[in-house]
Image (cartoon, helix red, strand yellow):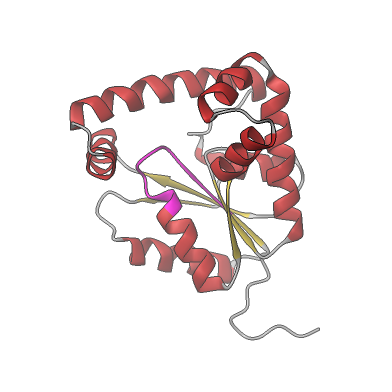
Amino acid sequence: MTRAPHEPTVQAVAIAGLPGTGKTTAAQLVARELGFRFVSAGGLFRAMAQERGLSLDQFSALAERDGKIDRMLDDRVADEARRGRVVLEGRLTAWVCKSHGVPAFKVRLDCPPVVRAERIAQREGLRVEDALHANEQREGSERLRYMSIYGVDLQDEAHYDLTLSTEQSPPDEVVRRIVEGVRHAR
């Protein structure tokens, strides 16, 4: 089978980043540009909660006590990556692809904490200070949890094929650079 000149050989793209970096926006737009499916790890997590008849808060509390839930989510993310023609969005998606041996173009989006807090505050109707504090709490907790469960620091750029700052780049520029990277990846 011959590929069209601009059709990527990469069949899975994993976009990671901390809250407020623009990973969901970028992932949805990259999926549209490539004609791929969009899958959110958070969406998969919410579906798992619904399957058990639990609220998101209840399921999150259960996941904190039961590491098997994180592993089941990882397996679902890896299964989606194996199906191909997908853009995965979530903090652990790049690492999950790597750890499960699933080839993927792995992207990390980065942005200073205050800018991320401003974005979240605007999106969720919060004060910037409150968003910044919530981010610090959540990120500290997740960093410890990911190190404890997986032994991985997701901020380590060695896990990624491409790291982009979204601080001053509009979404279309971020998407252009990701798509360019995907199309040139082998």
User: At 63% across and 61% down in the image, what residue appears?
Assistant: 86
Query: Where on the picture, by quarter, is residue 168?
Result: bottom left
Q: Residue 15 lies in magenta, yes or no?
A: yes
User: At 29% across and 61% down in the image, what residue appears?
Assistant: 170
Residue 63 percent location from the top left of the image: 62, 22
User: At 67% across and 65% down in the image, what residue appears?
Assistant: 85
Image-based side of 144 in relation to 5, left or right: left
Residue 14 percent location from the top left of the image: 58, 51
Residue sitting farthest toward the right:
1
Q: Residue 97 lies in magenta, yes or no?
A: no
Query: Where on the picture, by quarter, is residue 55?
Result: top right
User: On the rendered image, what quadrant is the C terminus found in?
Assistant: bottom right
Judging depth in this view, the residue of 184 and 70 nearest the camera is 70
Q: Is residue 114 above or below residue 38?
A: above
Query: Where on the picture, by quarter, is residue 71?
Result: top right
Q: Is residue 184 above or below residue 51?
A: below
Residue 20 percent location from the top left of the image: 35, 42
Residue 19 percent location from the top left of the image: 39, 38
Residue sitting farthest toward the front:
53
User: At 58% across and 73% down in the image, what residue appears?
Assistant: 35
Image-based side of 78 in relation to 31, left or right: right
Residue span colored magenta = 14-24
